[in-house]
Image (cartoon, rainbow, N blue to C red):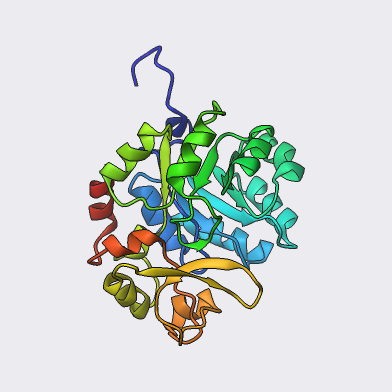
Amino acid sequence: MKAGVLPMWYQEIGLKYPIFQGAMSWVTTPRFVAAVSNAGGLGILASGGRTAAKLREMIRQTRKLTDQPFGVNVVLFEKQAAALCQVICEEKVAVITTGAGTPKPYIEQLKRARVKIYPVVPNLKIAYKMQKLAVDGLVVEGMEAGGHIGTETLLTLLPQVTAHTKLPVVAAGGIYDHNSIEAVKCLGAQGVQAGTIFLAAEECEISAKYKELLVAASNPGTTIKKSEAGIFARVLNLGTANRALSLHAAVNEGNTIIGAFMAGQVADRIKRIESLAAIFRRLI
């Protein structure tokens, strides 16, 4: 970088590209997260369903596989959220992304540990609340995304958020290639978060059935289903026989009866399994 030129927000984190890999429970293993970070993006571990001890183990495993920055996602309504945040601080992880709650109780300790804070926001009301905190940026997620989602499209939500914040905004939902990135840049985004396209990476350690169904998806390749817990999630459209109850069953077993094969609408565009290197070439 030339002398006197201020680094971009993502360069301050240590990233080559302003690309986050969305955290996906049971999917984003240490090996995969390290591979994403080694490719120049921000690999992000998912802490959902993990104990603090298990998360610490995952962080240390990841660090053995990369010297690049990576992050951890924390679902804040989980009982162990405080313990997970403590581990993130102690292990000096580069970035935390948060969802399903406010990071306010943990801001001070995260700042002391120099952890960058990026809440995921599904609507303008939550975006307003988050930007009042000492966070470093926002991940604005449209309902095109896979997994648990809000009700607004990225096209509608993103310009509303970028018009009211000076924070770096990372756009999520429907990201496939460089054209996707250019499109959200026009609406004020300064980076992107992608999840579904990374499910189709050779390096992604999910069941062969998951990848097979992802590649076979055709419009409408996804649908929104309500779990027994009453939470709405976007999953692959496998018909009424698929109850979409367990992401773990989809990831590890490829179980098409109870497996929740979470994926975003961009699944319709995925036609092959390819390397992370090929996916990043398409993005940049």
Q: Residue furthest top?
A: 4
Asked which quadrant contains residue 251, the reply is bottom left
Q: Residue at x 46, y 54 (%)?
A: 22
Q: How many marks?
A: 0
Asked which quadrant contains residue 104, the reply is top right
Q: Is residue 121 visible?
A: yes
Q: Is residue 93 visible?
A: no
Would residue 140 be found to the left or right of residue 7 on screen? right
Q: Residue at x 74, y 54 (%)?
A: 82
Residue 258 is situated, as x and y percent measured from the top left of the image, at 51, 84
Q: Quadrant of the N terminus?
A: top left
Q: Residue at x 46, y 78 (%)?
A: 250
In this orientation, which residue lies closer to the viewer: 96 or 179?
179
Q: Residue at x 56, y 52 (%)?
A: 72
Would residue 187 be found to the left or right of residue 247 on screen? left
In this orientation, which residue lies closer to the viewer: 262 or 19?
262
Asked which quadrant contains residue 222, the reply is bottom left
Would residue 50 be found to the left or right of residue 218 on screen? right
Residue 37 is situated, as x and y percent measured from the top left of the image, at 40, 49
